[in-house]
Amino acid sequence: MTEKVSKHFPKFLEDLPNVEGKVFVITGTTSGTGFIAARTVAEKGGEVVCLNRKSQRVNDATEKFKAAVPSGKFVNIECDLQDFASVQKACDEIKQKYKSIYCLACNAGIMMTPDEATKDGCDTQMQTNHLSHFILTQQLFPLLEVAADSGGDARVVYHSSAARDMTKNGLEKKYFEKNGGNLGGDGNSMLMGGGRIVRYAQTKLANSVMMYAMHEKLQAKQSKVRVIACHPGGSATNLGEHMKLPWFENFLMTKIMIPFFIQSAEDGTMGLLTGMLVEDAKSGVLYGPANSGMAGLAVPNPPKKYETDPDAMKMLWETSEETTGVKFAI
């Protein structure tokens, strides 16, 4: 991915508060927005629990963290989001190590992967981007409540994207069930459509709908835990480097979009860090470039009707419980 100069991030970073003594759990920290978020939290004094599947990339990222923030507190816990048992094991380890956590940042995601099933039978994109994060949220919620009760607030942040607006009929239940490998095939055109982009769009809409659904439940309980969502705009990360787009779309992306419209990975992380760190970030709000735009400051994005549809929120919550086997009662 072409290196981009950060336009807004230096000033944004300067204004972020000190978070010394707070614990942040972040998924997907080996590169991109997750790496930048973890590094930033450490720079601001927080302790970072990095959840990643085992790989050389974890070792490489750890060395980069140490070089960037020599005094930083980083804890690596193995967590494969395509394996529910691995996610549960990671949760158990976190609960053994910590009595409370300030923030769970559900950042990790994959994009436009083949129509394949995980070992649990789910679509690889949906399990990685939503279902495993559902388990993490349910399992770690008691630790967030402890932090909120003692410190005044705690946070869950879901990382959506502009792709949430690409769905034609809102959320569809079949994508959340154990139908992996049988969900539309491997068509990969972002302009003409195809199974890969349709499945990805469902996962990113799930991220925002999950936030709105959880916010309603937290408000009804008068909980001090905040739930926030974000989107990165067009961000120069390696999320889509594996994609084999049609030649004209590849030309459009590499020769026009990236050089002129895509913002830096740091600028793309401002929405995520707003939800995680900014003191006046509000629960029930999605932050990112305005109107799901490609670049710009992280500002509130108003919800679309299909994001706050009561039937969609109910279906998402109940089907996620059924598929993951966890009951998430707030």
Image (cartoon, rainbow, N blue to C red):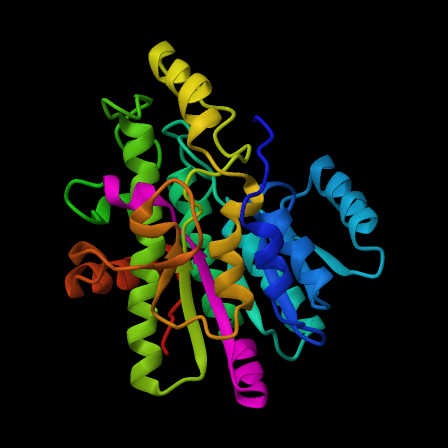
Q: Is 36 positioned to the left or the right of 178 in the image?
A: right
The residue at the point 45 percent across, 70 percent down is 281
Residue 169 appears at what percent x and percent y? Answer: 14, 44
Q: Nearest the camera: 291 or 35?
A: 291
Residue 162 is one of the magenta-drawn residues: yes
* Quadrant in which residue 313 is drawn: bottom left
Residue 293 appears at what percent x and percent y? Answer: 34, 43
Q: Which residues are magenta?
A: 142-166
> How many dots with numbers?
0
* Quadrant in which residue 76 is drawn: bottom right
The residue lying furthest to the top in this view is 247
* Quadrant in which residue 32 is drawn: top right
How would you classify the magenta stretch by its main secondary structure? Answer: helix
Q: Nearest the camera: 55 or 18?
A: 18
The residue at the point 41 percent across, 65 percent down is 228
Q: Is 253 positioned to the left or the right of 319 in the image?
A: right
Q: Is residue 157 above or below residue 96?
A: above
Q: Is residue 296 above or below residue 285?
A: above
